[in-house]
Amino acid sequence: MISIEELENPIQEYPWGSYTAISDLLGQPSPSRNPQAELWMGAHPRASSMMTISGKTISLYELIKKYPGEILGKNVQKKFGASLPFLFKVLAAEKPLSIQVHPNIEQAKEGYEKETKKGIPLDSDERNYKDDNHKPECICAITDFWLLNGFRKISDIVSTFETLSNGMLADEILQLRKNNSMNGLKQFFKSLMSSSTEKKQTLINSIVANVEKRIDTSLSYQWIIELHNEYGKDIGILATPLLNLI
């Protein structure tokens, strides 16, 4: 390849996506028929960008596999093999996304291999590992964009849940106080997320009611209400007091 070629980039349709942002960006009919969440520019095996060369359509994924050194350069090929080591995305989030946990590289390779051996298709909802890469991310917000990222200080988490939970998490908070460490936080989070359906609903109702009664609600508390309005009884709502709001 001795010239710059135009890419035709796939759009991922997820329920949290926008009906206008990506279609407006691309100059396509807007609003779109379905919610458009992500525009992918890259060579991911599940949804690669496409190119037309000499009248033939080929995916960037296939092209890199065929000519890795010429396209990636020798240094990149040596370090990452015959694959593009990043995926560029345009995100258009109309609604809040689910909680996500990204694996490290060892976990990603192990998980991908296990699910592949089980024969789980790459596009299956039952599949956690779509590829064998870890997922370090860098985000550049071009509009207002709120996210919850990384756990808050344990002392702040304890204080917040003591204030809002009406004693319903007394045992869990006591254990977290005794084991004031990342392992203790892991156990607290696991206990919260895996509570019985009845306890989850009662806890969410209680916390939401407490937040609604407060006069000087912080942004973090306001997002509890926002998420409750959007997702009702989903226990993920209570990740808000656990994580840093950015």
Image (spheres, rainbow, N blue to C red):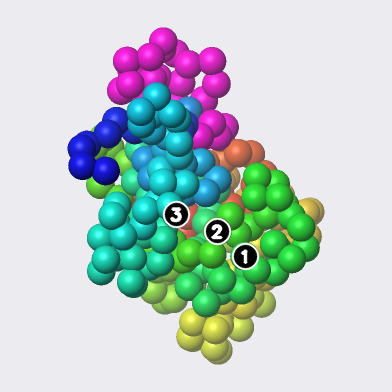
Residue at image coords 62%, 65%: 112
Of 9 and 76, the residue lying toward us? 76
On whether residue 11 falls in the magenta region, the answer is no
Picture quadrant of residue 146 = top left
Give the spatial CA distance, label 1 vs label 2.
6 Å
Residue at image coords 55%, 21%: 34
- Which of the marked residues, 3 or 1, is nearer the chain's N terminus? 3
Q: Residue furthest bottom?
A: 178
Whether residue 137 is visible = no
- Which of the marked residues, 1 or 2, is nearer the chain's N terminus? 1
Mark 2 residue element: loop
Whether residue 3 is visible = yes
User: Where is residue 4 shown, x and y percent of the image?
Assistant: 22, 36
Q: Amino acid at mark 1?
A: Tyr
Residue at image coords 27%, 34%: 5
Q: Amino acid at mark 3?
A: Lys
Magenta residues (range): 12-35
Mark 3 residue element: helix
Give the spatial CA distance, label 3 vs label 1.
20 Å
Mark 1 lies on residue: 112
Of 228 and 20, the residue lying toward us? 20
Mark 2 lies on residue: 131
Q: Is residue 97 above or below residue 182?
A: above
Main secondary-structure element of the magenta-colored stretch? loop
Cβ atoms at labels 2 and 3 below 8 Å apart: no
Picture quadrant of residue 1 = top left
Q: Amino acid at mark 2?
A: Asp
Mark 3 lies on residue: 65
User: Where is residue 168 shown, x and y percent of the image?
Assistant: 66, 65
- Which of the marked residues, 2 or 3, is nearer the chain's N terminus? 3
Mark 1 residue element: helix
